[in-house]
Image: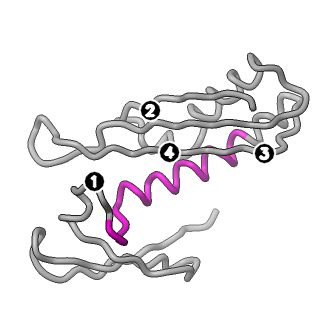
Amino acid sequence: MPTRTARTAWNGSLQQGSGQVELTSSGVGTYDVSFPKRAAENADGTTSPEELIAAAHSSCYAMQLSAIIADAGGTPQSLDVTAEVTLGPDPKGGFAITGIALRVRGEVEGLDAAGFEKAAQAAKDGCPVSKALTGTTITLDAGLE
């Protein structure tokens, strides 16, 4: 199986410094990162580890769910998946990812609402990114359109 790589170049202190994260395996882009913008409500044109985790989780989950729907005899027409990753204070000091909220809405042939909910939960539990984030509470809101 493949290994994927990203690289970050950082200059300066945590509060005054900034950096750029490069998606080196795909070569699709280089993105600015900054701690003050990471901790602010408005990202103001920068990304963050939490946003990158959200991207990884939503795409992984969509792939896993499409496979589970097919295994259950359904046909996914479309899946709209959002992952919200929250950064907050860690009681032990510093910061931590305090939760991830997955939301999926799907158009699926061959599964009723209960079958879709079962597949959606199985995808949450079986997605490799979910497995990697087991120390974080992951919630799920799933429904058919």
Q: Which residue is mark 3?
A: 78
**Percent position of residue 105, x then y:** 67, 36
Q: Which residue is mark 2?
A: 138
Residue type (three-letter) at the residue carrying disc 1: Glu
Nearer-N-terminus badge (3/2) = 3
For residue 97, side relative to residue 78 (left or right): left
- In what element is the residue under mark 4? strand
Marks 3/2: CA distance?
22 Å
Per the rendered image, the range of residues in magenta is 44-65
Label 4, residues with CA under 10 Å away: few <14, some 14-19, many ≥20: many
| Quadrant the C terminus occupies | top right
Label 2, residues with CA under 10 Å away: few <14, some 14-19, many ≥20: some
Q: Which residue is mark 1?
A: 41
- In what element is the residue under mark 2? strand
User: Based on the displayed image, in which of its 4 quarters is residue 88 positioned?
Assistant: top left
Q: Which residue is mark 4?
A: 83
Marks 4/2: CA distance?
10 Å
Marks 3/4: CA distance?
16 Å
Residue 20 among those drawn in magenta = no
Residue type (three-letter) at the residue carrying disc 2: Ile
